[in-house]
Amino acid sequence: MPQPPHISRLPVPEISTLDADLQKYFRKCVEKLGLVPNVLRAYAFRPAHLRNFISMYNELMLSDDSGLSTLEREMIAVVVSACNRCYYCLIAHGQAVLPDNAILACDVGVNHNWYMQFWNARRPQTMLNSWGFSGMGFGAAGVLGAKLAAPDRPCVSIVGDGSFTMVPHVLCTAVEYQIPVVWVLWNNFGWVSIRDIQLGMFGGRELGTMFHAGANNKPYNPDFAMWAKAAGCESFLAKPLTPRGFLEGVRRSLETRKNPPP
């Protein structure tokens, strides 16, 4: 298929052609991550820029004088990435929060598109999704099955508000059968992946894909945190979205996963 004229291709250098220090750094990436992140391979096109990037990263994330833990730094990066709408960085830094054996269940929607592009599965069968079938609610419900199959591993569903409202009864099932999983809900007030198709195909028009209510037509959704509490689940609302607030929510969710309420 011919590509549109605005899409260009960057010739990424082969690792074997780089200077010895950069080859060593990339080998360390493979040793720790199982791969070399795309952003580093792209920077390798300009070795001096790559060295500057590595120096800045090491100072921010690995220095000993900040008083912050590695996890706290990663979560700060997650929130900054969210504010900057850099989904590559959002997912890459978010991955550092979970252990290698965690199972991720992606639901359908915008979140699925970004995770499919940027999440680097570190073990086989640790990223579950519905692929092209696009069954809304797959991740929100499927994470329960993943936990039953792997009770000793953390199981996390990444789900948007549109997909979650298709199967909210999963909360009741988790409480009834004491299945400790974590749902991370992205609230963008609509079926946004469908809206984006409408905008592209119908000259910028949208119909019935965004959630609004009231005389002022404000974006609307239920209070998902209260909804979860009403079902008997623990819930944490990252509002306003701050690094420490989000980090605390993740920590508490994982601890609740280990010690479900009676």
Image: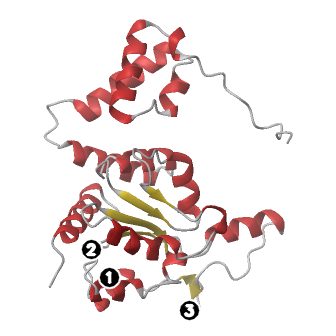
Residue pictured at 32% horizontal, 47% vertical: 100
- Is residue 182 visible from the viewing direction of this image? no
* SS label for mark 2: loop
Q: What residue is disc 2 on?
A: 180
Badge number at residue 214: 3
Whether 41 is drawn above or below 243: the answer is above
Badge number at residue 174: 1
3D distance between C-alphas at marks 1 and 3? 33 Å
* SS label for mark 3: loop
156 relative to 177 in the view: left or right:
right
Circle 3: residue type: Gly
Residues at badges 2 and 3 in contact (C-beta under 8 Å)? no
* SS label for mark 1: helix
Circle 1: residue type: Ala
> Quarter holding the C terminus?
bottom left
Circle 2: residue type: Pro
Near-viewer residue (123 or 214): 123
Near-viewer residue (173 or 92): 173
- Quarter of the figure with residue 222: bottom left
For marks 2 and 3 on the same chain, the one whose residue lies earlier in the sequence: 2
Whether 20 is drawn above or below 206: the answer is above
> Quarter holding the N terminus?
top right
260 relative to 117 in the view: left or right:
left
